[in-house]
Amino acid sequence: MNYKNDIFISYAHVDNEPFPGADKGWVTTFVNGLKTELGRQLGRSDAYSLWMDYDLRGNQPVTADIDNQLNSCATLVLILSRGYLASSWCLLELNTFLAQVGNGSGRIFVVEHDFIPHEERPPEFNDLLGYPFWVKNPDTGRIRTLAIPKPNPDREPEYYQILNELGRELTTTLNKLKNEADKKPDAGGLAAMKQKRLQNEKQRIEGELKLKNKEYESVLTSMSNPRIPQTTKTNLNNKLDQLETEIGALESELEQINSQLNKFS
């Protein structure tokens, strides 16, 4: 698809610190699960590429490598949390990608690590669809993030259900982008298509010109007969004039096409 990677993971590193009792952070665990789900949805584990920065620590600036990855990625998966909103660099990653794809592209997926009311979110999030990885207790109203300290399929099936939904939506988007790329020829393909069209047009004109010249010669032969009536001779003269005009137009058109074809040489 002319993208360096299919998926860019944008997150605050504070959300990837392992909890006691877990050997991996929440984000790493989530990404591993997402990779498994995408491999299942796409049919094989190598059907996509995912980029995630594991080295950046704290509130450090976006590096040139991260900026390069953002500008050559098909989709963005961001982990929305209090830590994400507190990081100017995380928001810069989002805005860098938004500047590339525009609002309403359907290429940004918001994984809601924390519950954050809409009025507390920056305007950049207004049109982005979220996938809540938190649940609200219907009795107490308390909200908790799923998979802390780590996922439990018996106690928290919602985690895997949402992961499955996100995997399906990502798969749909990646397949759509691939189909659009397959339908859109590259610059070389466009040039080859134009050259082929010109060659076909040249053959058509040459064929038509050959027929017109034969018709012209036939009319000339008919006019050489001294016995033809004057009315017929006048009509044949008119026909010759018409054929000369048509032949001249075809020759001019053929000259223009040859000139364009010469540019491909």
Image (cartoon, helix red, strand yellow):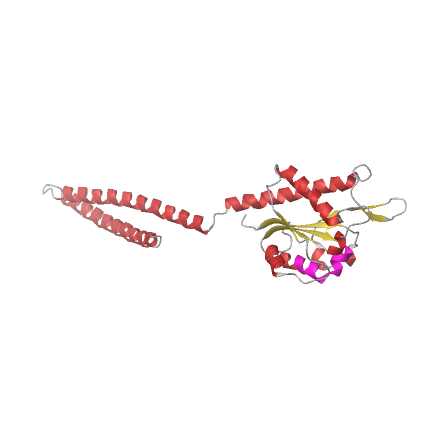
- Residue 241 in picture, x, y percent from top left: 22, 50
- In this view, the residue farthest toward the left is 226
Question: Which residue is at 40% across, 48% downward?
Answer: 192
- Residue 96 in picture, x, y percent from top left: 63, 59
Question: Which image quadrant for residue 212?
Answer: top left
Number of callouts = 0
Question: Which residue is at 76% across, 53% downward?
Answer: 15
Which of these two is toward me, 240 or 29? 29
Q: Which residues are magenta?
A: 81-93
- Residue 248 in picture, x, y percent from top left: 25, 52
Question: Which residue is at 51% across, 44% downward?
Answer: 182
- In this view, the residue farthest toward the right is 140
Question: Which image quadrant for residue 11?
Answer: bottom right
Which of these two is toward me, 170 or 62? 62
User: Magenta span has 86?
Assistant: yes
- Residue 140 in picture, x, y percent from top left: 90, 47
Which of these two is toward me, 163 or 227? 163
Question: Which residue is at 14% across, 45% downward?
Answer: 230
In the displayed structure, 225 sits above or below 78; it is above
Q: Is residue 147 visible?
A: no
Q: Is residue 40 left or right of residue 220?
A: right
Which of these two is toward me, 242 or 252? 252
User: Magenta span has 177?
Assistant: no
